[in-house]
Image (tube, rainbow, N blue to C red):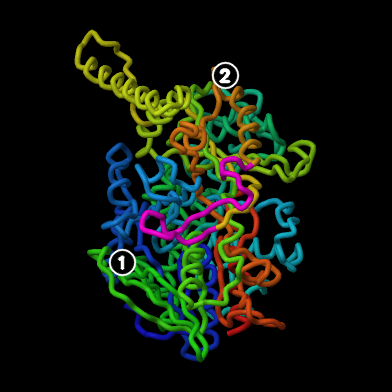
Amino acid sequence: MPKATHYTVVVIGTGFGGTMTAIPIAREIVRRNKGESILMLERGTWWTTAVGTVQDKEVSTFDFLVKKEQPVQFWSTPNNFRGFIDIFTRCFRRKKNEDGLYDFSVLGRRGLLGFLGRQNDGVGVVRASGVGGGSLVYSNITIRPPNLIFDDNRWPLTWTNAERDGFYDLARNAIGHGVLWALNQPGQSLVPPAPVVVQAGSVNTGLSNVVTRTAGLDPHWVVKPDPNNSRGLKQIQPPPNPVPPGRLDPHNDLWIDRARLFQGAISQLTAEFGTVDLAINDFDPANPGNQYDAAGNAKNYCERQGRCNVGCLPGARHTLNKQLMAAALGSPLPFPNGTPPIFQNNELEIQPLAEVDVIGARPGGGYEIRYAQREKEKPWRTTPQVVTADKVVVATGCLGTNELLLRSKQRGTLPNLSERTGFGFSTNGDYIGFIEGTKNRMRLTRGPVTTSFGHFNTGTPQTGADTSKFHNVEDQGIPPALGSIVGSGVPFIRRLSRSHHSQFFIVWTAIRWAWKVLVHFIASFFKNFAVRQDIFETDDEILAKMLCVVAQGSEAAVGQFRLGTNGRDTPLRVKRTDGKEFWQDSIYHEIDATLARLAPIVATNPNRRFENPFVNLLTAELNANAVPVAHPLGGCRMGRDASEGVVDEFGRVFDKTKSGPRPFYDGLYLADASVIPTALGVNPSLTISALSLRVASKIIAEL
C-alpha cells in the first residue's frame, strides 16, 4: 500500500510517458526540498529475468524484488513450444490472471475466439501490463519520424525545429542511458533545473546498432551488404581489405543473415534505408569503459537470442523497469548488499497492481483517484482504495487513457472534458506480413527482433514524392518459443486465404491440414518413411526460409472511441468517422504495393506475396479483418482549444467551460500516445518520450 493518502503528484502508468514525466518531477522535488512526494500507480506487476545476469550469476533481480516485498513475475524462459504454452497460460492478462503481461484486446462485441463472427470493430490491440509499460514488450526501436509528419495542421506545436531536435536528443539519451543521466548532461536546459541535484550514472550503455552475429566484433568489420549480391551462408571471415565508408560490401558474413539480406533487398526499392538504433546494450570493444557502471559493475549485453518481445534473459534491453527500480527501490548490485534507491527519502513511490477506475476533481482543488488494489498472490481479489493529489499525470497508454477519461466524464467526476474526447484514434498504419520460400536462409530466431528499416514516400524522387503515402518497413524476428506456431500457422493461413470463402470450405481446409499433420506424425514411426521429415524440424529450421516484416504508415487518424454499453461489449469500442473499415485505409494499399515489389526480390517463387494473416484472412465470411495494432495513437489528441482537442501541446487538459489564458483543469495532464494527433508512420516510443519530457518541463515550471 502507498505510504500516504495524499501526494504532490500522482502519475498513473509507468511506461514511456509515465517514466519520462515522473523521474524529472522527482528530481525537482529533491531540489525544492519541501517534503513533497510523487506516487506512480501501475495496474501490472514487476517483470524480470528468472536467471542471474550474464556477468554475475549470483545476482538475481527477481530475488531482490521479492526481498522488497514487491509483486514480481519472470519472463517465460523455454525457447521451444513449452515457452509458447507458458506465454499463453501465464503471461496473458485475462480473468483469474490479472497480473499477466500481455493484454490483447479485440475491440467490439464478444464472440467466438474474441473476434470471429460479425461483432468486431476492426481493431485488435496488443499492449503491456507491468512496471515499465510498453518498454517491456517493444522491439527496442528508437526512431524519429521525418519532419513531414509535423507539417500536418493537426499538430498545434509552437516549438521550433531546434527545440524539437533538443527534446528528441534528450529522449534518446533518456532511453539509451537513463533519464537522470540525460538530465545531468552539461548544456541540458530543456527540463529545469539546470544544476545537478541528483547524481546518477548511466543505467544503460546507450543506443546500439545490433547487426553482427555476436557481440564484440571489431566495428571495422561491420559494413553494409551488397544489394545486388545477397548471398547465403559462408565461412565467417573478415573482409580481406579495408572497406571504404558507405560502400556496400558483398563479403561481409559477420552480419546477422536477416539484417544483411533485408537491407540488400530493401536498398533496391528505396534510397532511405539502414540499421535502426536499438535500445539494447551491446558490447563495444572500441569503448570498453562504457561496459561498466559507476560502481564498476559490468553491464549486460545482447546475446542475439531473438527474444526481445517475450523477455530478454540476459537483461540487455533498456526496459524502463530498470530505471524505476533504481530510482525507487535500489539495485541488487553490487552483490550481496546492493545499492540504495536514488531517491532515498521516498520522494518517488511505485505501487504495482493498482488499477485506476476513475479520476475526480475536488471542490477545493486537486484530484481524487479511485483505484482497485489487487492482492499479490491472488490478483483477482481487489480492495478499493482512494488517494488524493495536487496534480495528476495520466499516462496509461492510448487505450487506457481514453477509457479512463471517457469513464470519468460519463460518471460526472470530470464533466467538463472536451467533446473531442475519444476522437482522432490512429492505428499508426501498423501492418505485419510473412512470405515463405525465401532465396536465402533468413533465420528469424537469431539476433534482436528488428535490425533494419526502409522509408518510402518521404518527399524525394528516390523514395516517392507523395508524403501523404509515407510508410516505413522493418524486418521482424520471431522468438524461438513461437517458431513452431508461426512456421506451421503461416502456411496454414495461406491455404485458408486461397480457399473458397464460405465457412464450410474454411472448416474443410482446416480438417485436411490437420489430417495431413497426423498422417505424417504416424508415418514417422516407420523406418521406410522419408528420412527428411518436416515434422522433425527444429523451430529454427521451420523459420529458416521465411521472412517477416512489419510496417507503419500515415494512416488517416479518424477513429473514435466510446465506452461499451452492455456486458457483451468490450469496455472500449471504436469506429472510423468516415464510414470505412480500418483495414480499408489507403495506407494499407501503399504498404501492400511496396511489399509486392519486395516479394520477388526475396522469394524463390516470383508469384509468392506477403501474407497479412489478420487482414487478408477469410475475407467477409467471418469478418476477421481486425487490424493488429501494436502502436495505437490518439483519442485524446492535442489541439489549440477544447473545440479542437483534449489537451494543449504541453499535455494540459482543457476545461470546456473555461476561457482566457488558462482554460484548463488545473493540475491535470496527459503524457502518452493518446495525445498524438496524427499517425507517426514509425515506432512511437521516441516521440512519446520527447513529448512527455516536454510535458514534464511544463509541470516543473508550474509546481
Q: Which three-letter amino acid code belongs to the residue tagged 1?
A: Leu
Q: Residue 288 at what x, y percent from top left?
A: 51, 54
Circles 2 and 1: CB atoms closer than 8 Å: no
Task: Give the residue number, with chain letter if any, for mark 1.
Answer: 65
> Which of these two is toward me, 421 or 410?
410
Give the crowd class for mark 2: few <14, some 14-19, many >=20 residues within 10 Å: few
For this orientation, the residue located farthest to the front is: 566
* Residue 580 visible from this viewpoint: yes
> Which of these two is toward me, 496 or 256?
496
User: What segment carries the magenta color?
Assistant: 561-585
Write the residue at 53% across / 58% down. Answer: 561
Tell me the distance, in whole angstroms, between the alpha carbons under discs 2 and 1: 53 Å
> Which of these two is toward me, 15 or 75?
15
First of labels 2, 1 by sequence position: 1
Q: Is residue 591 left or right of residue 404?
A: right
> Quarter of the image holding residue 375?
bottom left
What is the quadrant of the C terminus in the image? bottom right
Say which mark, if any, is on residue 607: 2
